[in-house]
Amino acid sequence: MMRLDPRYTWMRQVAALAALLAVWEAADRANLLNPIYAPSPSRVGAALVDLFADGRIWPHLEATFGAALGGLALGILVGVVLGVVAALVPFIAELLEPVMTVLNAIPRVILAPLFVIWLGIGLASKVALSFILVAVLIFFTVFTGIRQVDRRLVERVVTLGGNRRALVRHVYLPSVASWVLGNLKIAVGFAFTGACVGEFVAATEGLGYLLSFAQSTYNAALMFALILLILVVVLLIFGLAGRLEKHLLRWN
Amino acid sequence: MHDLTISYGGEPVLEGASLAVGDGSFVSLVGPSGSGKSSLLRAVIGLQRPLSGTVETGLAPSQIGILFQDDALLPWKTARENVALGLTFNGMVRGKALAEADAWLARLDLAGLGDRFPRRLSGGQRKRVALAQVLAMRPKLMLMDEPFASLDAIVRARVVKDLVALVEREKISVLLVTHDLEEALSLSDDVYLLSQGPRARITEHYDVPLPRPRDPVLSRTHPAFAPLYERLWADLSREVDQRAEAA
């Protein structure tokens, strides 16, 4: 069997992608593909350039970013607080755990129409959907994490003379931070899913709204361009989250 | 401690244990697995409530240090921060505690490693950091629960040698629990033997007449060592055999 040099894996992957795009483009030019369903890479590229050329993409990007980052921040905050409280107060855990389990079990995007009814078609309903997606994830991360905190570390701090406050500061909070950061990439993905689905259901701006517009006008090139744009944006944020995780969890 | 009875999972694992650790003396407790050795140390430091009996140390909690089998260093803190932790808990300002931690790290051959996180230290280095963490508190009594069991023989011998030199110099009392009979005899002034649990009891006491200061490796060649080891081994074997027959 041929042995592949792992150092050049990325080059082989890029070459394979380029070959696929070239075949796709050639098939389009030879009229083998219907551009209504499968527009060529050059048509998708042109649609993408168009979006930026006249500047109309920026308000949509701003709307989606605003909803996703707002939902992400709120979701992390509320998820951490509820997770910590539920882990430390059994009565609160009794009340919260069943609700969170149900919310975790269902595809939470089905709540999008409800949020539109409650909060309107503006930013709030998108933030709410991102928030609910992220908060449930973070709640379980923190709730189960605190319950599984290493007892040896707790005993170490206690035997060194640490009080309850010292335990929270030196054991529980760093543990919580590491679990949350470990799930940050998933949370970012959830936040953008919430924002885009919310915009797709009912909105006047945002990448999800543009996707909905492209679908209703059968504009596959615009749809591909938007999917590509969302992919790039999320990958960029994944990269930032990864760097943040690497820096803050450098002890690991 | 006097007439101490300790339970594990509701059942008494150790019954009626009485022993004394004199000022600056090194006392070991040996016995088979399940004889409640670790539970006894946890009761002394207050991590476990005994079913009955009393523990009197006459010391403040900060004057009692404990070394567990696992080094249990906080993984998100550097070696220096880990050592300084107990000092700051007991009121020392952070800057002074960090300087003190550096001095202890240097004393334990860890100079220059203060900025490393535990994950980037070897097993022996982590154990030394844990030791520095406890010694920095200037304890009067150190409890040790087989702290060196996970180390390889050479690293273990070096760490133990440093530990003995430090406790002799600082006149720290030590209560060590271990499976290792040779280690117990080579380090201790007194050794107590526990029977097989549950309901283990202290069955024998051995006075170890080896001179101090003591080298934990060379002390094994002292003429008094081998007879004492044979006696301890015979007593321990008899305990285990009797329990097996009873079962």
Image: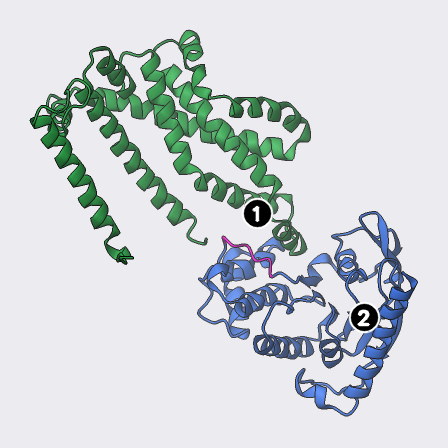
Chain colours: A green, B blue
Looking at the image, residue B170 sits to the left or right of residue A20; the answer is: right
User: Looking at the image, which is closer to me, B125 or A42?
Assistant: A42
Taking the magenta stretch, the answer to whether it contains residue B1 is: no
Q: Is residue B183 above or below residue A13?
A: below
Residue B182: x %, y % from top left: 73, 79
Q: Is residue B240 above or below residue A226?
A: below
Q: Secondary structure at mark 2?
A: loop
In the rendered image, the quadrant that contains the N terminus of chain A is: bottom left
According to the image, label 1 marks what residue? A171
Where on the picture, by quarter, is residue B126? bottom right
Q: Which chain hosts label 2? A: B
Q: Which mark is drawn over residue B21?
A: 2
Where on the picture, by quarter, is residue A47? top left
**Residue at (67% x, 82% y) in the render:** B216
**Residue at (84% x, 71% y) in the render:** B193
Residue A56: x %, y % from top left: 16, 19
| Amino acid type for the residue under numbered disc 1 | Val
Q: Which chain hosts label 1? A: A
Total numbered labels placed on residues in the image: 2
Q: Secondary structure at mark 1?
A: helix
